[in-house]
Image (cartoon, grey):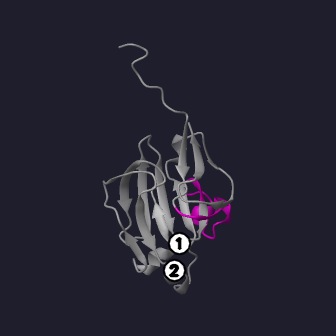
């Protein structure tokens, strides 16, 4: 086997914004499980629309039975949780519609789910979308690429080996 037959691994990977809105550091999310990084590093987005899209090419790893969260795995191995709203598991799926299936391959920008911010707010919850790299320990760093307004599919997080 030649030294040149193996494709070099890219030391940086990017996670795009899965929703339009204002990106905030993880520490500003009003939930200790997320803000303390217990599930991994990432950020929050205060959404300005109600559509979640794939933040990279990959596969749907899992979907919460209450339809408020989707787990994805990128082609390079990033395991990502997209969690819509804080404590929205209490809503038992009301206000959430998932448009993909577990095991389905997805492309960056493909619509994954839609949600109702009005229903989330009416239930007394924040609609903040949490984006967390759940296998953070596999990487040197997960960096938020600037807070503030983000468009769907705009660079959001940089994950480095």
Query: Residue placed at 57% from the left, 64% from the top?
Result: 20
Question: Residue 30 falls in which quadrant of the image?
Answer: bottom right
Residues tagged 2 and 1 counted as in contact (Cβ below 8 A): yes
**Residue 12 visible:** yes
Badge 2 is on which residue? 120
Image: 60 above or below 6: below
Q: Judge whether residue 79 is colored magenta.
A: no
Say whether residue 109 is left or right of residue 151: left
Q: x, y (%) of residue 76?
A: 44, 40
**Residue 39 visible:** no
Q: x, y (%) of residue 138?
A: 51, 41
Image: 24 above or below 126: above
Badge 1 is on which residue? 85
Image: 37 above or below 76: below
Say whether residue 71 is left or right of residue 41: left
Q: Check the picture and name the quadrant holding the C terminus.
A: top right
Instruction: Give me the disc on residue 140.
Output: none
Q: Secondary structure at mark 1?
A: loop
Query: Residue placed at 47% from the left, 64% from the top?
Result: 52
Query: Residue placed at 54% from the left, 71% from the top?
Result: 49
Q: x, y (%) of residue 122?
A: 53, 86
Question: In the rendered structure, which segment of residues is drawn in magenta?
Answer: 19-43
Query: Residue placed at 42% from the left, 48% from the top?
Result: 57
Give the mark, 2 or 1, whose residue is nearer the N terminus. 1
Q: Judge whether residue 41 is colored magenta.
A: yes
Q: How many marks?
A: 2
Q: x, y (%) of residue 58?
A: 40, 48
Q: Secondary structure at mark 2?
A: helix
């Amino acid at each position: 086997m030649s030294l040149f037959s193996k494709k070099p691994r890219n030391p940086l990977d990017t996670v795009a914004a899965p929703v339009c809105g204002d990106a905030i550091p993880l520490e500003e999310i009003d939930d200790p499980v997320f803000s303390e990084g217990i599930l991994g590093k990432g950020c929050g987005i205060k959404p300005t629309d109600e559509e979640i899209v794939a933040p990279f090419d990959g596969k749907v790893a899992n979907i919460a039975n209450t339809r408020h969260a989707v787990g994805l795995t990128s082609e390079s191995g990033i395991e990502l949780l997209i969690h819509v709203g804080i404590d929205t598991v209490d809503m038992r799926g009301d206000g959430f519609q998932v448009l993909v299936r577990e095991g389905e391959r997805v492309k960056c920008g493909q619509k994954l789910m839609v949600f109702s911010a009005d229903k989330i707010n009416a239930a007394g919850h924040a609609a903040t979308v949490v984006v967390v790299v759940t296998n953070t320990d596999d990487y040197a760093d997960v960096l938020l690429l600037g807070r503030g307004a983000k468009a769907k599919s705009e660079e959001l997080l940089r994950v480095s080996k």
